Image (tube, grey):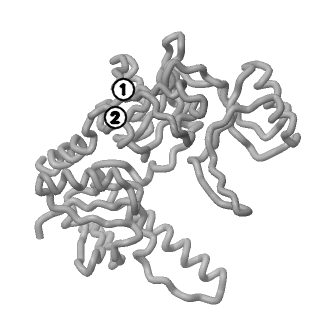
């Protein structure tokens, strides 16, 4: 059997659809798994001194890792590949569920050994570790406080005069009481602090950084696709460019310095990422401030306004790696 590219993606991801359009254009043979829509079943995994092989059935076709040239992961999971047993005993059910979680983790690890794009094992970043590492490699970062105490926030506010709060985890949205909520970066005023209980859930606070503009970089194997976003022109996006707004902001290609690129490359190498979206602030006094890196961030928002054709570049790089 001819070796193929195996793609696993989250349902509804537009970026992977556009990359696959380029795969089609270049006549690349691939197998596409949409995590919730494709019929995938786990067959077996052999681990011995002579052989390490994973076998899956994908849309009634048996595929082993021997038949996979490269693995292309984009946010997808394989939660439905194992049988679902109806069990009455809660402890046994929990035990079997934990077993399958370990097996799911291993399946993605095994496929990830042939990974060409994003890395499932590094898809949930720790913002605090990345801030610490960014500082280690010479990048400027915002002053940051993690605390559960109102008095600490008050001291932090008095020191910096203008602060924000942001989630330690990735943003979420949910509904409660017929209302929709989502987490996002917000300014914290003295009134907000006065309303806080003395002790609350540990939260991340940062010094608010005045911006000339924001920069979003899509990083792919040491190549930089950078875009400047003049989000400060929209009052709704002064704090977070992701805030919903009807106003269009100016977005243009941007070139960061070679010295700064080296620092980012060192950071990404340390984290172990070949691809990711990096957010920066360019201050009125011409400093670059590192905010965070998202291993599975959107890159279409950079590709299209700047005419970078990132999707085409990713497809071409994938094909080159298959050839070699």
Q: Secondary structure at mark 2?
A: loop
- Residue 93's place in the image compared with 314, above or below, is below
Q: Please provide percent x and percent y for residue 238.
A: 59, 28
The residue shown at (41%, 26%) is: 228
Between the C-alphas of marks 2 and 1, the distance is 7 Å
Q: Residue furthest top?
A: 285
The residue shown at (27%, 34%) is: 307
Determine which residue is flagged by label 2.
305
Indicate the quadrant where residue 103 lies: bottom left
Left or right: where does residue 47 sit relative to residue 138?
Answer: left
Of 203 and 303, which appears nearest the observer?
A: 303
Q: Residues within 10 Å of mark 2 (few under 14, many from 20)?
A: some
Determine which residue is flagged by label 1.
252
- The reply to whether callout 2 and callout 1 are in contact (CB within 8 Å) is yes
Q: Residues within 10 Å of mark 1 (few under 14, many from 20)?
A: some
Of 134 and 210, which appears nearest the observer?
A: 210
- Residue 134's place in the image compared with 175, above or below, is above
Q: Please provide percent x and percent y for residue 111.
A: 32, 60
Residue 136 in sight: no
Q: Secondary structure at mark 1?
A: strand
- Residue 304's place in the image compared with 62, above or below, is above
Q: Which mark is residue 194?
A: none
Q: Earlier in the sequence, mark 2 or mark 1?
A: 1
């Amino acid at each position: 059997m001819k070796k193929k590219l195996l793609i696993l993606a989250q349902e509804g991801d537009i970026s992977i659809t556009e990359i696959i359009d380029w795969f089609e254009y270049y006549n690349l043979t691939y197998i596409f798994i949409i995590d919730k829509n494709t019929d995938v079943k786990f067959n077996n995994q052999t681990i011995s001194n002579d052989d390490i092989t994973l076998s899956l059935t994908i849309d009634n076709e048996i595929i082993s890792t021997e038949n996979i040239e490269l693995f292309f992961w984009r946010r997808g999971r394989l939660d439905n590949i194992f049988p679902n047993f109806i069990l009455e005993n809660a402890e046994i059910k929990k035990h079997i569920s934990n077993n399958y979680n370990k097996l799911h983790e291993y399946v993605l690890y095994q496929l990830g050994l042939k990974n060409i794009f994003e890395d499932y094992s590094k898809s949930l970043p720790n913002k605090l570790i990345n801030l610490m590492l960014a500082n280690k490699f010479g990048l400027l970062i915002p002053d940051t406080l993690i605390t559960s105490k109102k008095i600490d926030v008050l001291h932090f506010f008095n020191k910096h005069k203008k602060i924000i709060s942001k989630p330690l985890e990735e943003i979420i949205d949910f509904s409660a009481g017929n209302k929709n909520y989502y987490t996002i970066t917000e300014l914290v005023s003295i009134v907000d602090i006065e309303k806080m209980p003395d002790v609350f859930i540990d939260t991340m606070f940062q010094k608010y950084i005045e911006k000339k503009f924001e920069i979003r970089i899509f990083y792919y194997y040491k190549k930089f696709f950078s875009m400047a976003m003049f989000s400060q022109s929209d009052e709704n996006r002064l704090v977070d460019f992701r805030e919903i707004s009807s106003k269009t902001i100016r977005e243009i290609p941007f070139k960061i310095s070679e010295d700064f690129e080296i620092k980012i490359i060192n950071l990404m190498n340390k984290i172990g990422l070949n691809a990711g979206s990096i957010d920066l602030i360019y201050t009125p006094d011409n400093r670059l401030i590192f905010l965070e890196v998202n291993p599975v961030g959107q890159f279409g928002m950079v590709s299209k306004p700047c005419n970078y054709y990132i999707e085409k570049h990713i497809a071409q790089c994938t094909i080159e790696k298959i050839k070699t």
